[in-house]
């Protein structure tokens, strides 16, 4: 009977193929129809794309209850017999997963303040929030200023334009990297559709103008103007054509190191001495020869090199597609990851040893205890850098990004400990 059934089916093969095609066409029309949910989604958010098709068990149909394709499509004579005579219940079918909540067209728009906070790239904002008071306290001849309230007020006066300039630099980079971020960072507010490009451009322009204007006034100084205007110049050259320094890995890394290492540390140190501290005013050039300022600039400059190298490791795919020749694209993710990790471990090791030596020659027991404690903390941070890197696959973007954010936490701790290391 099986042979007879097989022969009968083979004789009617053209008819069965037509039946399969008739079964398939109505379901395909639901996806290519210009009306309905798909079209409305494109009108509302043209930048949001549907997720790639994935395999789903036939026993668990999509949320809509419609299986868009038949269980199997025969490609051989044996497949044809199996499909028509006994289609398996647990076979695998091709379907589209529903859109995630972050990209669903029916979800409410997120609050503007939350979107703005995400747009600022919070890890950079937090770094600036900690850097300004830390450097200001470092400039004091003692641990605390004579007038703490006036001191904090003047710190806030410098912090507001500095944070606005931080927003300008990070926002401009996101505006010019939308196509790259669609590949590397699709959860950012512009690729995700949470912030329109026009609104983002307006925010960036206003933040840049207000940040530059913050360099004027009686309570300003040459150091503050150096930070604000120098950061604006380098941030613009880093992102905007025709210069667009990020196309050149050495110049891109240098611009990050100059801002994070030299401008911020030297500029705010000179500003603190000129307007906040009771010490005699110093020029920007003379601050470079002040041991406190010079050592902090050197430390955070080297840390800035690590950040500049590590930030491009998880972004290789998008950078390569857009022809951004970062060090990770040219040399490879593994080599850059290991180089950055070793450089930071060495930096923590040298810092720990230097603080231990400084504790031995400290003028008081309190300063000796502070230096020794921070030296031990630096050794522990160096060990953690090496320990956590052992479980990271340099070619796994998510693992590298998590490790990169861990390095930012160590960056925060370094600024938190800076006033106690003098």
Image: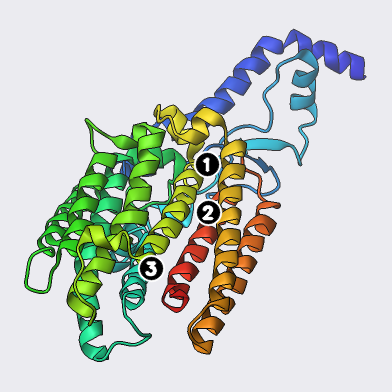
Q: CA distance from mark 2 to mark 1?
A: 9 Å
Where is residue 247 drawn, in percent x and y? Answer: 35, 32
Q: Which residue is mark 3?
A: 292
User: Residue at left 22%, top 30%?
Assistant: 242
Front tag of 1 and 3? 3
Q: Is residue 385 left or right of residue 9?
A: left
Q: Is residue 406 visible?
A: yes
Q: Circle 1 sits on which residue? A: 313
Q: Along the horizontal axis of the image, is 357 left or right of 203?
A: right
- Are discs 2 and 1 less than 8 Å apart at CB? yes
Residue at image location 23% in from the left, 73% down from the top: 273
* Above or below 199: residue 133: below
**Which element type, helix, strand or loop, lies under badge 2?**
helix
Pick the front one: 238 or 383: 383
Q: What crowding class fits label 3: few (fewer than 14 Cα within 10 Å), some (14-19), or many (20 or more)?
A: some
- Specify few, some or many for label 2: CA neighbours under 10 Å numbering under 14, 14-19, or 20 or more: some
Q: CA distance from mark 1 to mark 3?
A: 32 Å
Location of mark 2 (residue): 404
- Sequence order check: which comes first, mark 2 or mark 1? 1
């Amino acid at each position: 009977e099986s042979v007879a059934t097989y022969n009968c089916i083979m004789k009617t093969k053209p008819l069965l193929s037509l039946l399969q095609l008739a079964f398939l066409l109505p379901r395909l029309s639901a996806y290519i129809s210009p009306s309905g949910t798909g079209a409305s989604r494109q009108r509302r958010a043209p930048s949001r794309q549907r997720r790639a098709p994935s395999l789903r068990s036939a026993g668990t149909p999509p949320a809509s209850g419609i299986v868009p394709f038949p269980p199997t499509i025969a490609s051989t004579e044996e497949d044809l017999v199996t499909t028509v005579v006994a289609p398996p219940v647990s076979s695998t079918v091709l379907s589209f997963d529903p859109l995630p909540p972050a990209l669903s067209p029916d979800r409410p728009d997120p609050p503007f303040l939350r979107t703005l906070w995400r747009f600022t790239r919070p890890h950079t904002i937090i770094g600036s929030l900690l850097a300004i008071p830390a450097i200001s306290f470092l400039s004091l001849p003692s641990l605390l200023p004579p007038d703490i309230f006036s001191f904090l007020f003047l710190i806030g006066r410098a912090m507001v334009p500095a944070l606005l300039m931080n927003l300008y630099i990070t926002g401009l980079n996101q505006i010019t990297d939308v196509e790259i971020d669609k590949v590397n960072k699709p959860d950012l507010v512009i690729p995700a559709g949470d912030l329109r490009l026009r609104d983002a451009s307006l925010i960036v322009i206003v933040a840049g103008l207000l940040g530059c204007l913050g360099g004027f006034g009686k309570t300003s100084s040459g150091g503050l103007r150096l930070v604000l205007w120098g950061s604006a110049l380098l941030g613009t050259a880093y992102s905007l054509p025709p210069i667009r320094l990020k196309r050149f890995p050495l110049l891109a890394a240098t611009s990050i190191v100059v801002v994070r290492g030299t401008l911020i540390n030297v500029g705010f140190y000179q500003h603190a001495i000129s307007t906040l501290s009771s010490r005699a005013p110093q020029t920007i050039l003379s601050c470079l020869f002040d041991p406190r300022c010079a050592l902090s600039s050197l430390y955070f400059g080297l840390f800035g090199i690590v950040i500049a190298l590590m930030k491009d490791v998880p972004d290789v795919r998008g950078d390569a597609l857009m022809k951004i020749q970062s060090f990770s694209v040219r040399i490879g993710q593994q080599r850059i990851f290991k180089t950055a990790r070793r450089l930071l471990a060495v930096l923590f090791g040298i810092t720990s040893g230097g603080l231990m030596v400084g504790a031995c020659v400290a003028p008081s027991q309190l300063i000796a205890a502070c230096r020794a404690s921070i030296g031990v903390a630096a050794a522990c941070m160096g060990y953690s850098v090496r320990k956590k890197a052992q479980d990271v696959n340099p070619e796994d973007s998510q693992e590298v990004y998590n490790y990169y954010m861990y390095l930012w936490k160590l960056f925060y701790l370094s600024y938190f400990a800076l006033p106690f290391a003098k």
